[in-house]
Image: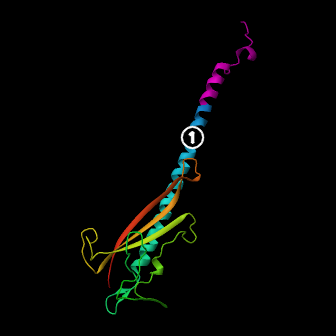
Amino acid sequence: MSMHIHNRLTDARGFTIAEVLIASVIITLAFVALATVVPIAGYGVQEGYQVSTATFLADQKLEQSKNLPWVGSPANDCVGISASSTAAPTVPGGSSCTNGGTNIAAGGAVTWLADEASVTNFPGYSRSVRVTDCGTGGGCAGVTDSGMRLVTVTVTYTQGNATGTVGTTGPKSIQVQMVVSQR
């Protein structure tokens, strides 16, 4: 019986240089692909955050306008009407506004719905409110009723780009609307 001695050095199995090079190319390509996707995913998260924040700020102002006093007798109108699509609401003629300890005469600006070039505690966001009288012109989406008003809130913010830096793709706006009725 012959005894065969096994030499570990000559029978060692490992990777050839070609296999190591191919593996390193594949790993490098994977890291390059990952490095490309991560900023885009970060941008998506940032955009989602900005849209959510803008929607929250718009809804906040809609809720505020819904709760403002607007009654016919005595004429207390704190919702107001915008003279144009570029004007913040003012108290209509023949009315006044009493809300808490604040009194505003006819033609005065409805201070709660004034334009905000920068929303407090939300830098980079601006907000405007426009109020349309549904009893004039073509009404509001087919509804013609002087006891109803269309409140439109527009929130504008500066959108980021794919690398996550802000201010490179320009401003973006969201708009939310609600019809309020006289009580």
The percent coordinates of residue 15 (x first, y second) are 66, 21
Colour scheme of the picture? rainbow
Residue found 50% across the figure and 64% down from its top: 53
**Looking at the image, which is closer to me, 91 or 122?**
91
- Number of callouts: 1
Q: Residue at x 64, y 19 (%)?
A: 18
36 on left or right of 134: right
Is residue 59 rendered magenta in the image? Answer: no
Question: Tag 1: residue type?
Answer: Thr
In this picture, is 121 found above or below 52? below
State the residue lying farthest toward the bottom.
74
**Which quadrant of the figure contains the N terminus?**
top right
Residue 29 x, y percent position in the rendering: 59, 32
Looking at the image, residue 39 lies above or below residue 126: above
Q: Is residue 22 left or right of residue 41?
A: right
List x then y, in percent, for residue 76: 37, 89
Tell me if I can see residue 40 in this picture. Answer: yes
Q: Nearer the viewer, residue 58 or 77?
A: 77
Work out whether residue 138 or residue 179 is closer to the camera in this orientation and state it.
138
Q: In percent of the image, x 58 and y 47: which residue is there? A: 163
Answer with the quarter of the image where residue 4 lies.
top right
Viewer can see residue 16: no
Q: Which SS class for mark 1? A: helix
Q: Is residue 17 magenta?
A: yes
Residue 62 percent location from the top left of the image: 41, 73
Residue with the most extreme top position: 1
Residue at label 1? 36
Crowdedness near tag 1: few (<14), some (14–19) or many (≥20) residues, C-alpha within 10 Å = few
- Which quadrant of the figure contains the C terminus? bottom left
- Which span is picked out in magenta? 1-26
Q: Which residue is pictured at 32% across the width and 92% down the height?
A: 73
